[in-house]
Amino acid sequence: MVSRVIPVEAFDLVIFGGTGDLARRRIFPGLFRRFRAGQMPPNSRIVGAARRQLDRDGYRAFVTEALSEFVPESARPEDDVRTFLGCIEHLILDAASDSGWDALSGMLRDGVVRAFYFSVAPSLFGTLAERLRKHGCASPACRIVVEKPFGRDLESARELNRILRNHFDESQIYRIDHYLGKETVQNLMAVRFGNVLFEPLWHAQFVDHVQITVAESVGVDGRGSYYDKAGAMRDMIQNHLMQLLCLIAMEPPSRFDPDAVRDEKLKVIRAIERPAPRDIVRGRYVSAVPGESYLDQVENADSRTESFIALRLRISNWRWAGVPFYLRTGKRMAARHSEISIVFKTAPHSIFGQTLGQHRNVLAIRLQPNEGINLFVTIKEPGPGGMRLVDVPLDMTFAEALGRGVEDAPAAYERLIMDVIRGNQTLFMRGDEVEQAWAWTDPIIKDWRERDEHPDSYQVGTNGPEGAAALLHGDGRKWRDIDDTQDSA
Ligand code: NAD
């Protein structure tokens, strides 16, 4: 079966921060892939706006380099690169000044979709919104795409929402959380709501617990000054892990449409109880190698910021009463590995006796690497020797059945950008969701500040501090291994 690519309408996409790391690494390679897939009409235009003094050819050379670096040679035939470059313009513009805006407004066309991607430092988001409106660049149907982080607490997020909504309607604001653009995250919704098999089991009676792990093997290298002001709670939990938790825990929306889905997610965030200190483990990586410890890589030698966090959360509603949700994320961990696991209860009675061990079904949704979904089922180990039970994975990604690998699927950023052009906000965070997530996060961080405690240490290349394992051991459970989840439950 060959995938069907539906072209979007022609568009003018302006990327503020068009010479930045995100543009180079994600946005241009993503757009090029969509262009090659036939999704981007050739009369579309991409305008890179930045302060760097480049002319059009200089900017096209910048984009060519980005494609050479981030798109494999076999996937960028010269002819396609040349045609794609023909869609690209550059504009010298300082978001913090009023010059350059008339040139921008003169470039924009009527009758095509108009989108502005704020790929700049968050301190410029408000300014950009104001100037777009002031200089007549904002049309009634235009869209703005806002990168993370969206605020650093409830107050700053509210203020940013207020400024953006002064100039744009909520239906025009696309707050990116690229985790929501991952193929597997959407497949999770298809598996959950497109089948009759799972939803009857999807609650406290059958689910023992849920684990969400987002482990990174890299440290804060090069981003130390930003990261030290954020930490794992602000950088990962408040947005990415919270969003994943919402998709697992939400009630079935009545339709797969933006507000129906986001209403249900918001209800989940409202129902997450505030964790007690015993439900939280904070960590910070250390290494015997000089320069490799967290504190060597940030300016503040007395920092209290965590590079790892593990949480035991409860959702107070009928569906999830008594089911713990264990979340963990950190830097310099054993492997780069993100997975959501729904761990079901054991069978109520084992007809095989106790000696065959305890077996549980696990639905494991792997986000990286190798996106995919596995359902672990218990079967008899083949061969003679009596009844032995073994847990085997059923690959529910069905890449082969669909005639293509997940590697052919659009990556998160390109999918989300195409959704912006289509005007579909389902996979973007609404302002009230973001505020509610901060309202939950703020008191936890405030409590840490008052306690003034240092996070626990963990060795680089491990799974975090010992307390993280103890958090589950104390409940008679254990974290799923970070690197062997493909073949064991
Ligand atoms: P960057 O520092 O590499 O690039 C910033 C860009 O902004 C540059 O093109 C620069 O010219 C431009 N810029 C700076 N000041 C400007 C001004 N006054 N007027 C106009 N342009 C100006 O940053 P980045 O890594 O590309 O990140 C951009 C945004 O994306 C940030 O909000 C960041 O938090 C977010 N983000 C980045 C990544 C990533 O992988 N790089 C991932 C997630 C989120």
Image (tube, rainbow, N blue to C red):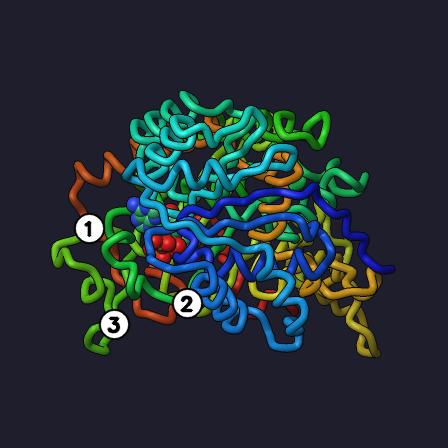
Amino acid type of the residue tagged 3 in the rendering? Glu
Q: How far from the left and from the top, in percent, is residue 251? A: 64, 29
Ligand 1 has an atom within 8 Å of the beta carbon of the residue at disc 1:
no
- Say which element carries label 1: loop
* Residue 382 coordinates in the image, percent (x, y): 82, 74
Check residue 217 in the rendering and tell me which mark sits there, or answer none. 2
Report the side of 1 relative to 32 (left or right). right
| Label located before the other in sequence (1 or 3) | 3
Dot 3 and dot 2 residues touching (CB under 8 Å): no
Measure the C-alpha gap from mark 3 to mark 2. Answer: 13 Å
Percent across and percent down for residue 271 are 49, 27
Number of other residues with Cα within 10 Å of mark 3, as a class: few under 14, some 14 to 19, many 20 or more: some
Q: Residue at x 19, y 62 (%)?
A: 295
Which residue was labeled with disc 1? 304
Amino acid type at circle 2 is Ser
At a point 63% along the width and 55% down the height, the residue shown is: 364
Of marks 2 and 1, which one's residue comes earlier in the chain? 2
